[in-house]
Amino acid sequence: MHAMRCLALAALLWILACPSWAQEPISNLPRNQTLIVENPEGTIKNAGWFNIWAVNAGGQSTGLHQLAMDTFWYIDPQRGIDGVWMNSLASDKPIYNADFTEMTVKLRNGIFWSDGVEFTADDVVFTTELHMKTNGMRWSAPFQVNVASVSAPDKYTVVFKLKKPNSRFHALFTVRWNAVWMMPKHVFEKIADPLKFDFNKPVSLGAYVLHSYDPNGKWFIWQAREDWQRTTLGRYGAPGPKYVVYMDPGPPDKRVIAQLNHELDIIHDTSAEGMFTLAKQSKTSRGWFKGFPYAHPDPTLPAVIFNLQNDLFKHKRVRWALALLIDIKAVSMASYRGAATISAIAIPPTGTHTESYHAPLEAWLTDFELDTGKRKIRPYNPHIGKEIADMLRPSMGDQIPTSAEDIAKSFGRGWWNADPQAATELLQAASFTKRGNEWLTPDGKPFTVRIVVEGDLRPVMTRAGSMIAQQWRQFGIDAKTDVAQGTLVDRRAGGDFDTIISWSVETWGGHPDLSFFLDSWHSEFVSPPGKTQTPRNWQRWSSPALDKIIEQIRTVGFDDPKSLELGREFVKLAVQEMPIIPLMAYNVFTVMDETYWKGYPSAESDPYTDPVPNWGNSRVMMVKLKPTK
Amino acid sequence: MNTVPAQVKGPERVLSVTNLRAYYQTQYFGISREVRAVDGVSLHIDRNEIYGLAGESSCGKTTLIKTIVRAIRPPLSIVEGSVMFNFAGRECDIYRLNRHELDSMRWRRLACILQGSMNVLNPVRRVRQSFIDFAFRHIGQPMPQFLALIEGHLARLRLEPAILDNYPHELSGGMRQRVTIALASVCRPDFIVADEPTTALDVVVQKDVLGLMREVQREIRSSMILVTHDIGVHANVTDRMGIMYAGRLVEEGRTVDVIRNPRHPYAVHLVASLPRIGDTTQKQGLEGAPPNLAAPPPGCRFHPRCPLVMDVCRKEHPPLVDVAAGHRVACWAATQPDARRAA
Amino acid sequence: MLAILRDLMRYRPQFRLGVILTGVIVAFAALTLASPHPQQDQFVVPPDVPPSWAHWFGTTSRGQDVFWQLTFAIRNTMLFGFTVAILSRLISVAIGMWSGYKGGFVDRVLMSINDTFIVIPLFPLLVLFYFVMRDKMSWPLLALAMAALGWAYDARLIRSLALSLKTREFTQQCEFSGMRTSEIVLQEHLPYVLPIMFYTTMNNMNWSIGLEVTLSVLGFTNIDTPTVGVMIYWANQHTALVAGIWWWIFFPVLFVMILFIGLFLLAISMNEYIDPRSRLARMGGASG
Amino acid sequence: MNAYATYALKRLLQFALVVFIGINLAYLITHATPIDPVEQTVSAATAFGNTSPEAIAMMRKSLREIYGLEGNLWNQYAIFWQRVLVGDFGPSLSAFPTPVSTLIGRALPWTVGLLSVSTILAFALGNLLGGLAGYFADSRLLKIAGLAVMAVHPIPYYIVAFVVLIAFGYVWPVLPISGGYRINITWGWNADFILSVVSHAILPVTSLVLVGIGGWFMGMRSLVSNVVTEDYVTYAELAGVSRGKILGAYVMRNALVPQVTGLAMSLGSIFNGAIITEQVFGYPGIGTLLISAVHAGDYSLVVGIASVSIVAVSTAVLFIDLVYPLLDPRVKVS
């Protein structure tokens, strides 16, 4: 009895005694010199592994590829510090010969590894040749496919001889999230098997070096290099944060709590509601947009992807019918609480794309006519972006922009009118029939559609998926979502789905070139049903017209205005065929806390980069950030 | 009241029970019952005397014992009456003692040998530990001497000291009972309560155990109350005896008197069940069963089974009155035969 | 059996409370019939409305009325628990009775398998099972899987009962009087088995519902059909807690707790009834 | 051959059986999963960067070789057992080429710590309280305590953990709600580290104890209320043996015997609780590792974890079974 009382008392005292340091997550680092960033990879299973060239072995966005890696070029998904194109290790743009069978790269000099060895052409040659002779390294395949030979005429020049013409070979070394990272020859040449080498502690080519890490993989701490001038970031000035912590703050709500307590400077992503909470409760938190919709539109395009090898969707009228059954406003509400940037075309409405594609094509879209089988309709409604804004204004007040152009930037422009009547006609034209309240396929079976979603790994898409399912259901189609969790990648690659909410369109963001995803849409790469489909043509769409466009793009230069024309061709084709139903940009609720740091990128004042911190490109933030105290 | 002591000792009273009523009052799933297990019993026991308590099972013997040693827990409760002990000249009502006094008295003065010796010993403790738990604090000697003393005691009772290291379940029934006796007598208590100590045992062992008890009692000159339904045992062991029927004492007196010349028809029946040398008379059993104590019959509780039942028996229950020196009976027929004539 | 229930109802406050709590929940679940919205639809009411007269339990960020959602959730959850309980009863009674009556070799084999299932940590297996089944993972299937894993503990209980019954006199009498084992079991022993069945059923429902909630919260079940777990899952998806939509979490948790405690009270009071020792103890006044 | 030896042998056989069945179950289920580690790896490699299709095909092929996924299920199975017997589960596929055993070795101490502390706490507290409640049946305080623990008992681990998390992590933020220790803490036996580990463990342990305690409490209480009516207790009381000794050496001591069997029986489900708790509190350990392994389709890791946990749990059970006779001398003869 007595013992019990004492125990209870003791417990209580202990809890009370626990000062708030109990929640204070970080010890003996000067907080005002430390930037704490969420690593969306979560907890890293084998934290002690830094050999990023071995596939899937350790963490990537633990700060490793943001702060310790480097390569020839970066293309910024936004405006960039001094332009979208950044020459990093290379001193200039790639130099191709006439028929794109040879690429020459001039290297910057005065760049040093963190252990004091200079970075030279030998490292490049070593990296290339190692990948060519070793199977199963992260970039072995592309090297082996493309490169005939590599040579270093002098210390600062590298020449790649290619097996076949390829005007986009440099893309392999151009960071869009990541790219081929350069290996330190002087470390790896001593290693027998590069696949079994943990590279701990890593020799860094970036402005930071590893300070310490959690053996259980919850946090990694990086420290600014003394000789930061001798790195490619050096020319932009000293890195602001002396220490950068990449950590796993747990599920979305824990992230919000952490930032409310100013223990997490950059949240990689959270739910819309979490974002709003921070906007309400924390003066110092801000998103990419200062106000609504806050989120950063990544150059990726969540869409309803059809499995075009499924007979149900062979007919483009069916695909169009399903598209016209979607009320994008409701989807935007369900997935992002309205904070979505919608797009009617298969191009992410982000970075420079809005000028290159969305604006110029607006007129064409408005006049676009669709034959329902009974009549011709103009499905495009250019005002939907504005309608979403108006719908939100009552609850969100003056956060909602008013100028047409601001609205277009944050909510997108137009989309397809929800038009059940037209959908009915289209389906009937595709010889679907309606019995009672239920639609039947041409062969008289109930029209069932499964929508594969990823689950809590990507909440917004799951939410969008279940909303679309509901809309189709209400029209009389037996639609269900199907949470794939960890199996999503297999099912997407295996074509094991009717429709899937995912993206098969990814772009540079800052550059109009589409080859980044489009090249892989060529019909030569479409696998037979059931066989694994290579990225990214998940819809398994094969169309001669498309192939023609792709083949032409391959033959014109990266910056050639012709390639932009071809890009627009593709957009129009995609609208007519509707192989995927584009929904919106993948808006990422990256939230930045200005308690300790200022100078984050932002849509209105300084869009110098994508703030989403697991992008290799996000490294430039380090030189822009300045302490507030 | 006047009693004639069994031995030539001064009549030093050790226990006197007066008009004791102990009832079981249960309330389970709505059915509430009151079982009058002990209903107005008075008796007394003198120093160095063995008092026997007889009667068929469920006549309240065991309950009486429980009440005497204050081993009652709900639903059994004392309704009326008192239990007085007199140890070393100090009179005390066992129900007035506080916990401390009680504990210091138990085993030092008042020890028990319980029915069902099978599990009166803690199954997970060695015999030695039981001895220590029970007796150590009373003996008041350092452990080695204490253990030596225990072994001596066991030896006197012809028990191997080795059994101290056994667990109860490793001993035979007889062994266990002998251990219990040793345990009960080790503190040389003034008063020993023995409740059916031999019931579970076979005849041979029984004899031997009884012998042992008698010995012990003689040696430590304690008083003892011995409960058993077996009249034979009483005949052999006890000085005085009482016969209980349906929660009441129906006859009491010197064992010789009671057995030679039982007055109460029930006693007569019990005694008749004793085998006697050269007895050829046909024994006729007693029909009927002891009454349900939850709803006892009015008047004399024996009357439904009584061969000489009279009206008065059905109406009021007979008091316990002396019929000879130290011989008391509760029976209308036995006490006032004229009542029969009146009927 | 009915008589027992009646007695319990009359004289055991725990049981009465249990009946009331469970009853409330069941009645609540029954309201699904009156629900104005189909269970899967979203944005049928304005989102994030705190509890009010219009929406007693408030509304979710998915534009669903928490009250009506919860009626469905509770109903589905209970249906689920019940199904698992029934299925696993079948197994455990079969196994328990069989090994109890057969005894000997059969008994030894069955019981060692049984113990294996008791010892093995089931949760990892269930998670794996989900990944094998994926979209084919309807709740009946999950129920089946859990039934297949959740029978062991009670099978032991029932076996020991069977053992004791087997040794009772009346069993032998029946055998002598030439009744077939099946008859004996059905006519003579069922009355003893039923209360235990009831008891284990309640417990098993608690167990299975508990696991279901856990699995769905982690997203390892079909998230289209609302269950209590699925509701919490969606609430987490919308970070309802930090967003201050506490009612979205509070009411499901509250109601499922009531359900658990209700079932549990039913179980223990019944157990008290069937356990002769505890009855004796109660008469001895030793237990509260 | 003496009784204890036969008893011990029986237990050992049972142990072997459990392990065998358990590990096979794990192996079969995991190999039935549709998740293909190679696809996982490929998509991890190509998720963001740009890669030409024929390159992918090539990568897929070489990965198959490296991961040793060639060969049919049967000889994979044979190899598997050869490895298990020497405690080697091969390389993890989602953390290639790190051996599974290394990953588990890193996580296991945390789970074992969390489990043993909370189990012991729950068992001790539950039995103590329950014993007292059974013995002092009319103490109001104990009655209330009883009601409290019984109210929490039936609620599943997740809910309890979740509520605890909200209460102390959000509503009244006094304790850390994620991780096992603070960032950048220096490992070692210094006060700072220990304090940090302890404070991080409080919430997980609390939630586990809260759930666990009720069962022991009720079991003990009813057992005690039966034991007090046993003759040997009455007898000891008649002998005026001190209350404390009766409660400890007579009542609780005897009631504890079945409770220990209960402990052995329930270790499995306690382990489930640990997995969930770790998940909720982002606590380093087997549970978190298992979930992430499942997500990554790393079945060599999953099989490893499942097997290790099965072996661990059944070893604990075996241990309890083997010391059991010390607790109950009667076992030897029965």
Image (tube, rainbow, N blue to C red):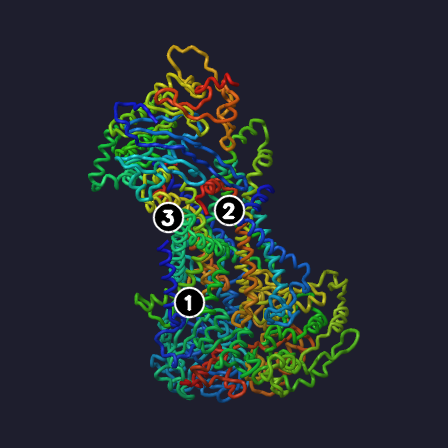
Identify residue type, mark 1: Gly
Rendered location of residue C22, percent (x, y): 58, 53
Q: Which residue is mark 3?
A: D319
- Residue D179, disc: 1
Chain under numbered label 2: C
Residue B320 left/right relative to A453: left
Residue B197 left/right relative to D58: left
Chain under numbered label 1: D
Rendered location of residue B157, percent (x, y): 26, 28
The verdict on a common chain for dots 1 and 2 is no
Q: Does residue D26 appear in the picture of this structure?
A: no
> Which residue sits furthest right?
A374
**Above or below for C284 versus B43:** below
Identify residue type, mark 2: Ala
Secondary structure of the residue carrying numbered label 1: loop
Q: Which residue is mark 2?
A: C152
Residue C5 left/right relative to A210: right
Q: Does residue B93 appear in the picture of this structure?
A: yes
**Label 1 to label 3, Cα distance in Å?**
31 Å
Quadrant hosting residue C50: bottom right
